[in-house]
Amino acid sequence: MKRKTDNRIDWETFSEGLWRDNPVFVMLLGMCPVLAVTNSATNALAMGLATTFVLLASGGLISAIARYIPKQVRIATYIIIIATFVTMVDYVIQAISLDLYNALGAFIQLIVVNCMILGRAEAYASKHRPLKSLVNALGMGLGFTFALLCLGVVRELLGAGSLFGVDLFGENFQPWVVMVLPAGGFLVLGTWLLLFDWIKQRKTQSEGEELHAR
Amino acid sequence: MHADSLGFIFLNTVLANNFVLAMFLGLCPFLGVSGKLDTAIPMGLATSFVMLVSSVSAYAVNLVLVTLDIEFLRLIAYIAIIASAVQLVEMTLKKYSPGLFRSLGIFLPLITTNCAILGLALFQTFKGYDFSQSVTYAFGAGAGFTLAIALMAGLRERLALSQLPSATQGAALSLMLGGLLSLSFMGFAGLGGGH
């Protein structure tokens, strides 16, 4: 495997995952946890942080040992490394907060099959130096957490009238229950994507008009 | 019906707690391969087959893990089983139906990272199902997945013929459709009554 010579770490290395290549909104990776655990903002935050940790740890380790892994078995090796870190996270969350552990359920263990993590290992960590991979993984993880929060906040606000478990609207609020049910996850994410597509389209349109006016 | 009876488990997994539409498992192929009915149904069947194989093997491996008291290795063991099951399906398809093999493309090896399959193996362990219950659960999950992906592909084939605003083309629309499908499947919730 050839290593890229460019090992400079700049803002772009970090910010790539936050916005331009956001794993959820742009690349549509790791959708299952995105929809399944975002019925409250707290769950969304916990899931985002757990995924970020696995992304960081596996990214760092894989990028450090990538050159010793035979090419034919690399995917299997990556999966096993990821599974090891996920098992660790699983036990740690169970020890810290049993309530959270029960709320997230099997989805903590299902971080293993989050295609974003394997994707970053294959496409980025195995081709860059450990430090650069770590910075990039941190950006990706924060971008993922940001996206989860975008969904979690909207769904909890509309579906339960609260935010991080704190009641906001008082007793007269009629909760929009469908938002915390499965259907709401699809609809809210669809609406976010629609919004981003629309903004992008407006931007390219106005850029085109500017070019035309010159 | 009793909550542990086989018929109940099957109906519950196909309709009321559909893996894709109610539990959000296996969304990548659900959004990625649902463009055409001709590829969606084989994809559903291939996934069902992998589910069945990995469910049976996961049951056996779990017995070994429990007797040896090394349950912390469960995740790693399951993922290894699933990867081999996918490899098996891939080789079979490549030999007997090369055309289908090509049209499924990258999504075939990606069945490994389909969370529906690992989810199935984990859930059957958490719920403490015995052998026949596990197999029924796997059948139900496979049928439910195939049903969901086929419905979605049918809808998208019809939509391709209609005129839409340009911003709604692509993933946003698929998610909206998924939301509506999920809403309609909520109607089955009365059949199951909880997880």
Image (tube, rainbow, N blue to C red):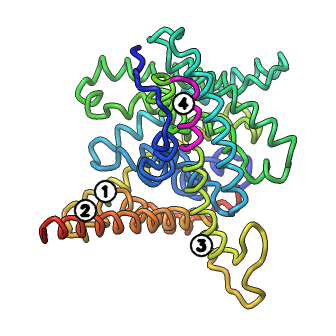
Please give the range of residues in magenta: A129-140
- Cα distance, mark 2 to mark 3? 26 Å
Give the quadrant of residue B127: top right
Magenta stretch holds residue A81 = no
Residue that label 2 marks:
B158
CA–CA distance in space, label 4 to label 2: 43 Å
Around disc 3, counting alpha carbons within 10 Å, would you say few (fewer than 14), some (14 to 19), or many (20 or more)? Answer: some
Q: Which amino acid lies under the numbered mark 3 shown in the image of this protein?
A: Val
The chain ID associated with circle 1 is: B
Q: Secondary structure at mark 3?
A: helix
Disc 2 versus disc 3: nearer the observer:
3
Vertical position of residue B192 compared to residue A24: above or below? below
SS at circle 2:
helix
Q: Mark 4 near mark 3, Cβ–Cβ under 8 Å?
A: no
Query: Which numbered disc covers residue B154?
Result: 1
Chain containing mark 3: A
Amino acid under disc 4: Ser
What residue is at 29 percent from the left and 27 percent from the top? Answer: B101
Q: Position of residue B183 (x, y in %)?
A: 51, 68
Marks 4 & 2, CB-CB < 8 Å contact? no
What amino acid does circle 2 point to? Arg
SS at mark 1?
helix
Q: Residue at x 33, y 53 (%)?
A: B153
Q: Which residue is mark 3?
A: A178
Same subunit: marks 4 and 2:
no
Reply above or below: B67 against B36: above
Residue at position x 45%, y 19% from top? B88
The local secondary structure at tag 4 comes to: helix
State the quadrant of the N terminus of chain B: bottom right
Q: Residues within 10 Å of mark 4 (few under 14, many from 20)?
A: many
Real-space CA distance between mark 4 and mark 3, rounded to the nearest whole angstrom: 40 Å
Q: Are marks 1 and 2 on the same chain?
A: yes
